[in-house]
Image (tube, helix red, strand yellow):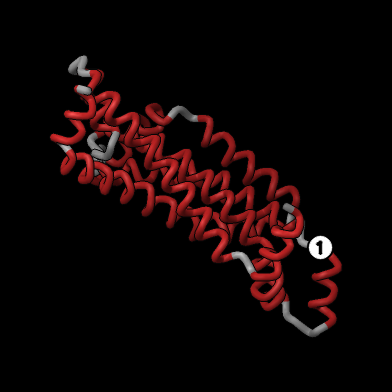
Amino acid sequence: MEILNYAIDNWDLILLRTGQHVQIVGVAVALAILTGVPIGILITRSEQVAQTVLYVASVIITIPSIALFGMMIPVLSLIHQGIGYLPAVIAVLLYSQLPIIRNTYTAITNVDPALREAARGMGLTPMQRLREVELPLAVPVIMAGVRVAVVMNIGVTAIAAYIGAGGLGAFISRGISQTDPRQLVTGAIAVGVLAVVADYALLGLQWLLTSPGLRQTARATT
């Protein structure tokens, strides 16, 4: 009951922290899409390059978030941005690369070769084949990677409160430092709810972006 009363009394602050959280994750994942999707497409041309890029992205994602924040503090302090919004966005951007690059690479490489040959036979250029055939078929898998990146990094962003980035993690960090279970539980529940809402919202977006033909195929197989 105390937790519910605390949440009601601090509803405006919860909304503010939620907005900060969404902004960090949204900006970082948007940048990750703009960089990760082209990288995932480019590495389909070389298996060796693909394995190297995916290995590097895998190593980055294994670095504990608090350690990554710590490594960025002295570097970004050179431009007076050692703590706060910028290092949080950079960390989430780096953590988002693996699921987006991997899913893009997997989706493009798994396109049916017969479809590529048909497109080539129709006289489409490589860029046209990518735009008209490969990317539409790859959208569901790419969006699945985006969903993984968003849900995962909603949790990572909670840690960013320790470097002054704000967000819902501020409730958790203050709840721990002040031994206040009301703030701790409020922050934890808010992060969990945000992750579920974001996942379902992106699932709906994934459905909208999927071509009608693939939607019908998905219905037929379920």
Quadrant of residue 142 within the rendered picture = bottom right
> Is 142 left or right of 29, judged from the image as shown?
right
Residue 33, image x and y in percent? 50, 57
- Image point (47%, 42%), residue name: 151
163 shown above or below 141: above
Q: In the displayed orientation, state which residue is furthest to the front.
A: 1
Residue occupied by mark 1: 112
Query: Could you tell me the amino acid type at mark 1?
Result: Asp
86 shown above or below 180: below
How many numbered tags mark residues here?
1
Say which element carries label 1.
loop
Residue 20, image x and y in percent? 26, 46
Badge 1, how many Cα within 10 Å: few under 14, some, many 20+? few
129 shown above or below 41: below
- Image point (70%, 58%), residue name: 218
> Is 155 left or right of 53, judged from the image as shown?
left
Residue 184, image x and y in percent? 27, 24
Q: In the displayed orientation, state which residue is furthest to the bottom.
A: 123
Residue 77 visible (yes or no): no
Quadrant of residue 12 within the rendered picture = top left
Q: Nearer the viewer, residue 175 or 212?
A: 212
Quadrant of residue 80 within the rendered picture = top left
Residue 221, image x and y in percent? 76, 55
Q: Nearer the viewer, residue 191 or 34?
A: 191
